[in-house]
Image (cartoon, rainbow, N blue to C red):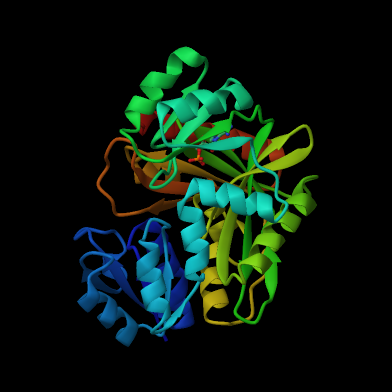
Amino acid sequence: MKVGILGAGQLARMIALAGYPLGVEFIFLDPSADACANKLGEHLLGDYNDPDLLAQLTERADVVTYEFENVPAKTAEFLATHTQVHPAPKALAIAQDRLVEKTFFNDIGIPTPAYAAVESLTDLEQAMSDIGYPAILKSRTQGYDGKGQSVLKSSDDLAAAWELLQGVSAIVEGFVPFDREVSIIAVRNVSGAIVFYPLSENIHRNGILRVAQCCTDDAMQAQAESYASQLLTELNYVGVLALELFEVNGKLIANEFAPRVHNSGHWTIEGAQTSQFENHLRAILDLPLGSTAPVSKAAMVNFIGGLPRTETILGIDNAHLHLYDKAPRKGRKVAHATICADTDKQLASLIDQLSAIADQVDDS
Ligand code: AMP
């Protein structure tokens, strides 16, 4: 069985690492010659809309999936007319555009921050009289890890924030004074079986995820599962889906969903019975889904911009290092470590220890 993946970054790499024990082979399409999954399978080097490469992918892969959502939706739609593509291109198209995504959430009864479409400075000024300060202006497309976003604290910020977007279509959202950021990783296979992982509590800095911690028996689990389940069903979704949520006063508000495996689920590699990567493959290959039960207290710390010394991380009991084989660069995710512990106290202390190491190598 050969799986084709659009994108050959660290998420594709971890999917492939999970697939080899199951006898799955991989073929990647990625425009970057040094994409970090490329030692784990065949690499079709070129654009996502190169017709020859897309033809090769459909001929050689039994099923196609993606590791990031900025693959052109047209590419996924074209591939879906020739082979199986999971998740369906519709999920990709919705997740690519923050305005379409927020509208979709609202249409299916999932609450979001107040928002408005912005095509001009005048639109922005008008929207702000309804939404109120503070707020966040975001590009509708191509944004990730806080890129293309500005916080608006007063009307003095509007012109500069709009200028920064250089005329691209945007969305302005009310700033949610959240108590926590959480995400739920949900999985649905071709036959319709669904499983959920325990919530992850996520700490971001400068819009980039730093720490994700598995929350067992969380009071918000049922609400998060109900929203994720609605998404899976409405989209007839197959694969792993990550839904990012804000918790405010005991209620959950949707931020966005990712139609793919997700950074907040990396702790599942060592921290759960079955990792999100293996379950994504099981889902798209219509195999029985694996247990999502945690095997211990678990968390993940990202290394961004710089690498820790391998010896330092491996010298910490119950720490597992994952290097992505990417050259360090400012703001770039280059590795993560999972930590497993028996008690909350031990886990908190390990998170502090690992975060301090991550801060030392982080150049942002
Ligand atoms: P995003 O790229 O939309 O996921 O945003 C990156 C991070 O910015 C989020 O994880 C939050 O920490 C923060 N953020 C985004 N939108 C909002 C919002 N409407 N209210 C408060 N914080 C936000």
The residue at 38%/39% (across/down) is: 304
Which quarter shows the N terminus?
bottom left
Seen in the picture, residue 193 relative to 267 is either above or below; the reply is below
315 lies left or right of 290: left
Total number of numbered discs in the rendering:
0
Seen in the picture, residue 185 relative to 354 is either above or below; the reply is below
Percent coordinates x, y for residue 312 in the rendering: 40, 40
Which quarter shows the C terminus?
top left
Percent coordinates x, y for residue 258 in the rendering: 52, 55
The residue at 45%/12% (across/down) is: 156
Percent coordinates x, y for residue 219 in the rendering: 80, 45
Percent coordinates x, y for residue 326 in the rendering: 28, 51
Residue 294 visible to an observer of this rendering: no
Task: Determine which quarter of the picture holds residue 202.
Answer: top right
The residue at 70%/62% (across/down) is: 229
58 lies left or right of 289: left
Residue 224 visible to an observer of this rendering: yes
Task: Determine which quarter of the picture holds residue 133.
Answer: top right
72 lies left or right of 229: left
Seen in the picture, residue 299 relative to 150 is either above or below; the reply is below
Residue in the foreground of this view, choosing between 178 and 121:
121
- Quadrant position of ligand 1: top right
Task: Determine which quarter of the picture holds residue 193.
Answer: bottom right
332 lies left or right of 185: left
Residue in the foreground of this view, choosing between 264 and 68:
68
